[in-house]
């Protein structure tokens, strides 16, 4: 079957079209992205602004049309942190449904973590043993650990790269002192979650997912995306520390010139690097392996698993 997966995140809206069947490897057919910056289109009361809602409706309508012309039998549409946190999310979601016919399902942070973990488990298989996964989004940080397809521990923390950039790193470049203060704050925030993850058992493989981790790995010498998804890519704590010292002194426009950093990610890559560094430090991880699969693939896999039982987790109606 051909599926469309529409992901409304804090920064971008992403449509992934795949051919998939149960027990098979989902094959990407096309990928379309639009920078929406929904989290930045939220006012001081926590409401998505009228302009932000207008852009969301227009983008969802455009992407739904692309999914239809691409031959998708179904569009699985979901939203994460920015919509989840908005005070007026119900009204915005209702408007999207009425005007586009697409019902956006809002994933909880824990569901987001669990679905991402499922994708990681399927990518590496049972031979990977117990897995620790770290996923950095625009609005939240997800931490999971377990030996099965469903993690024993699944945590979602409001420590996303975009959120921290807005709250902590407004200056461009952010400045050495501000970076140091954020480092200390992140260490304190991760003390309890890291203890919970450690208490659940030692892991055999530590993994990082998300565009942030892929960019950080590329900046520290990993193979480019053009080398394909099956090339092993890693991120080390020592390489990450050196990278932070370098990119934290640069402006966002200069960072956008670096290979592996898109212009829409250049503003928040420093915060993303600091979250990655703090997470690895709190968990005692010296090296992460970068997994090419994450939340979208987890949703596809869960749908294929449950399709035979007639239960769909998310989707357009």
Image (cartoon, rainbow, N blue to C red):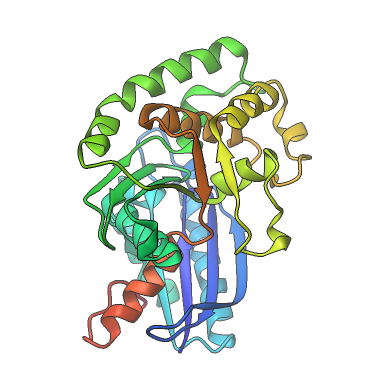
Against 84, is 301 above or below? below
**Residue 309 appears at what percent x and percent y?**
21, 86
User: Left or right: where does residue 202 sit relative to residue 265?
Assistant: left
Against 310, is 299 above or below? above
**Residue 136 appears at what percent x and percent y?**
46, 43
Q: Nearer the viewer, residue 286 or 140?
A: 286
Splitting the image into 4 quarters, where does residue 304 fall?
A: bottom left
Q: Nearer the viewer, residue 159 or 244?
A: 244
**Residue 39 appears at what percent x and percent y?**
47, 44
- What residue occupies the far front of the structure in this picture? 127
Q: Residue at x 68, y 58 (%)?
A: 225
User: Left or right: where does residue 252 sit relative to residue 136?
Assistant: right
Residue 19 visible in image: yes
Which quarter of the rendering shows the C terminus? bottom left
**Residue 94 appears at what percent x and percent y?**
33, 65
Against 168, is 13 above or below? below
């Amino acid at each position: 079957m051909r599926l469309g997966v529409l992901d409304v995140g804090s920064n971008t809206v992403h449509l992934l079209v795949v051919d998939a069947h149960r027990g098979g490897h989902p094959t990407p057919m096309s990928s379309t992205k639009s920078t929406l910056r929904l989290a930045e289109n939220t006012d001081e009361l926590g409401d998505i602004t009228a302009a932000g809602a207008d852009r969301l409706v227009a983008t969802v309508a455009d992407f739904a049309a692309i999914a239809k012309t691409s031959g998708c039998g179904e569009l699985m549409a979901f939203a994460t942190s920015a919509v989840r946190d908005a005070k007026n999310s119900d009204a915005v979601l209702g408007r999207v449904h009425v005007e586009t016919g697409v019902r956006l399902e809002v994933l909880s942070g824990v569901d987001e973590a669990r679905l991402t973990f499922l994708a990681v488990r399927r990518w590496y298989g049972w031979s990977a043993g117990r897995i620790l996964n770290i996923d950095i989004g625009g609005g939240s940080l997800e931490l999971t650990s377990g030996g099965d397809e469903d993690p024993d521990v699944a945590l979602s923390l409001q420590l996303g790269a975009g959120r921290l950039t807005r709250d902590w790193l407004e200056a461009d470049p952010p400045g050495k002192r501000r970076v140091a203060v954020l480092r200390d704050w992140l260490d304190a925030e991760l003390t309890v979650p890291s203890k919970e993850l450690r208490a659940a058992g030692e892991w055999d493989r530590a993994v990082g997912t998300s565009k942030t981790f892929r960019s950080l790995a590329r900046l520290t010498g990993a193979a480019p995306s053009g080398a394909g998804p099956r090339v092993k890519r890693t991120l080390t704590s020592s390489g990450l520390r050196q990278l932070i010292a370098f990119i934290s002194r640069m402006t966002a426009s200069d960072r956008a010139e670096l290979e592996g950093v898109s212009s829409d990610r250049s503003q928040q890559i420093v915060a993303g690097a600091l979250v990655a560094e703090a997470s690895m430090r709190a968990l005692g991880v010296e090296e992460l392996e970068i997994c090419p699969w994450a939340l979208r693939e987890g949703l596809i896999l869960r749908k294929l698993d449950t399709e035979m039982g007639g239960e769909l987790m998310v989707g357009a109606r």
